[in-house]
Each structure stands twice: as C-alpha cells, then as structure tokens.
Amino acid sequence: MGNIMDYISWRGDLSFEQSQFNEVDNLILACFSYVNLDGISAVTKQKGIGLKKLTKEFMKLHTMQELEADKSFIRLAPFMMMEMAKSVRFGKCVVRNYVNDIVTEAEQQFAAMEIVLEDGTSYVSFRGTDDTIIGWKEDFNLSTGVVPAQKRAIEYLQKISEHTDGMLRVGGHSKGGNLAMYAAMQCNEILQEKILSVYDNDGPGFPEEVFS
C-alpha cells in the first residue's frame, strides 16, 4: 500500500477531468473499503458524507496511537484515507451506503460502500477478507462454490443501481474482487448497462460449475 500512498502524493493534485480514471485509482478505491467506518451513521445513508468530513468523524472515534499500534494487514487503509481526503483528486468524494455485516451462523462476512466521484460516477467497492475468523473461513469456502457474500453482493449492487443515477464502476481486492466480478456477471441486463468497468484485484477464481 506504500506505492498507493506515493501515487496519491504524486498525482493527487490532478482532478479526474485533468487525468482520467485509471487502474491505480481503482486499486485505491478497492482498498478504501478496508477502512472500518462502523459508528459513523452518516456513511450508511443514501445521502452519505464527504470524504473530508468522514475522515474527521473517523478520527473522533480512533486515536493515532491506536491506528499506529494496529498490526493487521489492513492497518494502512486509514492512513490512505487521510491522504485521499487532503488531495484534489479524491477530496470531494462522497462515501455512502456503507454496510459491514458478519453473520456467524451463515459463515458470511460482507462489507461494501459506494464512493461517488466528482464527475457523478460511482465506484462500488467490495471489501476483501478482513481479519475476522468468519471472513477467512468464507474465503476458504469460495473454492467450493457460491458463498453467502456473493449473493449479498448481487443484492447490494442492485440496491445501489436503483438509487444512483450515474454510471458505475465495480471493484474490490482479494475476496472483494471476486464479489465484484460475481455481482456484475449475475445482475440483470439493465443494471449491467450502467456498469462502466469491473475490477478484480487479486481475487480468487470461480469453480467451473458456478456459471454453468
């Protein structure tokens, strides 16, 4: 994620009008879904919250000492968010429709968010495997067929489509990339027409029978 931080510092002064959306922007927004936004009610709503304000609200709930003490593989995501908020490129984004659900009985870990860019397009970001036991177990179950989070991803993407006028990009990292690909391929044709692109960043593949 260090290279991503360098990119934000290097290209963060350019708007999407000046430099079109690219693969690195996709990876940034895919990784952004790893930030735990629990406790910030505005981000769960359709109206959403601007990234600058979201970052301030996040820091009311977390201290720098706490964030720096985090040893998980997603520990840099909050610091990436802070850099995004300071940049021209991402600073005016609105984050909305955040969900973070863990259903132990169903062995389901699902988290996603919609990030609205300044040009009116949205990036639907599905979170990959987090540091929960349920998340890792569901990641393992991906090799056996359809998992609950994949079905949840279709429902989530459908909901976003119904409430968003702009065109969509869909993506995620790790399991999130798998969810993005699955949801985009399994949703209805009307929704598919609204999708500009789908990004599967290092996501696991699918058993052959999934799409047979």
Image (cartoon, rainbow, N blue to C red):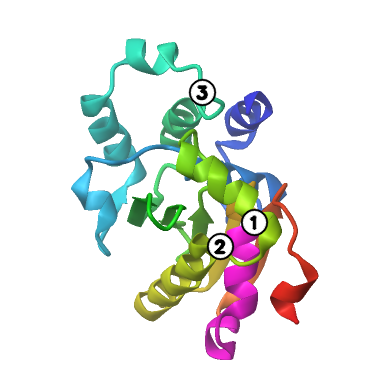
Among the two numbered marks 1 and 2 on one chain, the one whose residue lies closer to the N terminus: 1
> In the figure, 116 relative to 90: above or below?
below
Magenta highlight on residue 134: no
The quarter of the rendered structure image containing the N terminus is: top right
Q: Indicate the secondary structure of the residue bearing disc 2.
A: loop
Instruction: Measure the alpha-carbon separation of dots 1 and 2.
Output: 6 Å
Within the image, what quadrant is residue 197 found in? bottom right
- Measured from the top left, where is residue 152 in percent x and y? 45, 67
Instruction: Measure the alpha-carbon separation of dots 3 and 2.
Output: 24 Å
State the mark number for residue 72: 3
In the figure, is residue 192 to the left or right of 115?
A: right
Residues at circles 1 and 2 in contact by the CB criterion of under 8 Å:
yes
Three-letter code, disc 1 = Leu
> In the figure, 195 relative to 202: above or below?
below
- Classify mark 3: residues with Cα within 10 Å, few (<14), some (14-19) or many (20+): few
State the mark number for residue 142: 1
Within the image, what quadrant is residue 181 found in? bottom right
Residue placed furthest toward the right: 208
Among the two numbered marks 1 and 3 on one chain, the one whose residue lies closer to the N terminus: 3
Magenta highlight on residue 191: yes
State the mark number for residue 127: none
Q: Indicate the secondary structure of the residue bearing disc 3.
A: loop
> In the figure, 190 relative to 104: above or below?
below
- Classify mark 1: residues with Cα within 10 Å, few (<14), some (14-19) or many (20+): some
- Classify mark 2: residues with Cα within 10 Å, few (<14), some (14-19) or many (20+): some
- Measured from the top left, where is residue 112 in percent x and y? 44, 54
Pick whichever, 99 or 58, lies toward us: 99
- Measured from the top left, where is residue 14 in percent x and y? 58, 42
Three-letter code, disc 3 = Ser
Within the image, what quadrant is residue 55 found in? top left
